[in-house]
Image (spheres, rainbow, N blue to C red):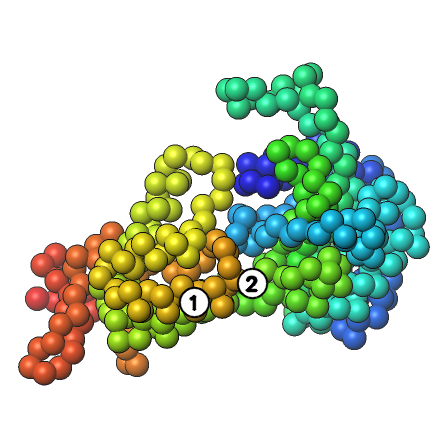
């Protein structure tokens, strides 16, 4: 899938655009017990509730590929005989109409997932999209479409207890105490099945949403998809820093890290300007070329390639922003943190002064300390 295809589906989650007829779900307790199940006709719900449900489902496929969204792939064996894929296909073919099949999915999720907030809500829906033809000018032509895409969407939302508050009562023109409520928050996890590849169904793929930067929810992914979960974005960053530090050792200099940061940032900027619909990723080979241009020795580059493949896998490509924070440049010592505009790396250098290693900042344009201009 590409971001444009995901965006096309996200636009479906409005009452006047969707073909969703029912909202299904269950409420899961802190210990994984299913406390309640429900089946709501979307058309019979008040407009405000329709909007709330559709918004939670939409947020279960929000964000960008390679960040909160990851593509999952099924093997041929799974598609032919896999239990997990078979359950998803059964749900799809029934369009979620059978309570027993829905219950099987709820039990898989409830048995494999614990959230920090405790209780959570599982929302399920099935949409049927008459895919319009996309012209050469990128316009959508509904009358020329000949493909129908039927898909499942699921959102797992933490349920949180609100604090007691004073709420205004318009009828009494006064504030009254309002006790604690239990409310559904934005999704922590979600998925879409099957994948929407080249604007058609791909039964060998699914789309996973994960809001967390640090947790991969391995047990959930294993239970629902029986596949290897993608590495969480925060973990990718930590691991890449470790790969650079350990593989380059004494050659991991400020200049090397600055250059890698600059190159990744420039790649992201060029990709954004080109409006390329494909997600930008970089390979081990691309990163090796960047290191070579900084003067890293061949033995250290070889160590980098080995460490990278051990950590991320052979032929794995990752978005640049998942490796280093391309939006910001930070210099950090045990007692000082300096944040620099990434476009002005020229203002900072590391050098030895009087036998002491120092970070030197050019400050010709003035200095403020806690908002006070100093000279």
Circle 1 residue:
306
**Residue with the most extreme top position:** 143
- The crowd level at tag 1 (other Cα within 10 Å; few <14, some 14-19, many 20+) is some
Which residue is tagged 2?
A: 231
The residue drawn where x is 81% and y is 63% is 108
Q: Is residue 362 left or right of residue 287?
A: left
Place of residue 251 in the rendered image (x, y in percent of width and height, measured from the top left): 25, 71
**Residue at image x 30%, y 81%?**
334
Does residue 88 appear anywhere in the picture?
no
**Numbered disc 1: secondary structure:** helix
Query: From this viewpoint, is residue 289 visible?
Result: yes
Q: What residue is at 54 percent from the left and 41 percent from the top?
A: 3
Q: Secondary structure at mark 2?
A: loop
Q: What's the residue at 49%, 44% (across, down)?
A: 279
Left-right relation of 12 to 280? right
- The image quarter containing residue 2 is top right
Vertical side of 291 occupied by 126: above or below: above
Residue 50 percent location from the top left of the image = 75, 42
């Amino acid at each position: 899938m590409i971001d444009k295809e995901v965006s096309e589906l996200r636009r479906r989650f409005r009452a006047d655009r969707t073909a969703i007829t029912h909202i299904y779900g269950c409420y899961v307790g802190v210990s994984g017990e299913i406390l309640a199940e429900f089946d709501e006709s979307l058309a019979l719900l008040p407009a405000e509730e329709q909007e709330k449900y559709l918004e939670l489902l939409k947020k279960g496929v929000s964000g960008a590929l390679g960040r909160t969204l990851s593509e999952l792939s099924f093997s041929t064996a799974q598609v032919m005989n896999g239990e997990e894929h078979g359950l998803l296909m059964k749900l799809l073919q029934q369009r979620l109409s059978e309570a027993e099949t829905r219950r099987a999915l709820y039990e898989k999720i409830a048995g494999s997932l614990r959230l920090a907030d405790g209780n959570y809500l599982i929302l399920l829906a099935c949409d049927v999209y008459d895919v319009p033809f996309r012209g050469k000018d990128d316009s959508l032509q509904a009358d020329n479409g000949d493909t129908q895409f039927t898909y499942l969407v699921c959102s797992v939302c933490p349920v949180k207890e609100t604090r007691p508050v004073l709420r205004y009562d318009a009828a009494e023109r006064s504030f009254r105490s309002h006790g604690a409520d239990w409310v559904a928050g934005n999704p922590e996890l979600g998925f879409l099945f099957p994948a929407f590849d080249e604007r058609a169904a791909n039964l060998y793929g699914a789309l996973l949403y994960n809001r967390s930067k640090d947790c991969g929810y391995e047990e959930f992914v294993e239970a629902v998809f029986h596949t290897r979960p993608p590495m969480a974005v925060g973990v990718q960053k930590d691991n890449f820093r470790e790969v650079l530090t350990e593989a380059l050792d004494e050659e991991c200099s400020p200049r090397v890290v600055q250059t890698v940061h600059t190159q990744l940032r420039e790649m992201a900027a060029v990709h954004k300007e080109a409006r390329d619909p494909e997600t930008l990723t970089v390979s081990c080979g691309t990163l090796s070329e960047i290191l070579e241009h900084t003067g890293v020795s061949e033995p250290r580059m070889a160590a980098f390639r080995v460490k990278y493949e051990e950590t991320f896998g052979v032929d794995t490509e990752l978005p640049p922003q998942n490796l280093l924070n391309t939006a910001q440049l930070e210099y950090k010592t045990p007692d000082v943190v300096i944040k620099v505009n990434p476009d002005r790396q020229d203002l900072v250098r590391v050098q030895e002064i009087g036998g002491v290693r120092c970070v030197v900042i050019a400050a010709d344009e003035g200095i403020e300390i806690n908002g006070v201009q100093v000279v």
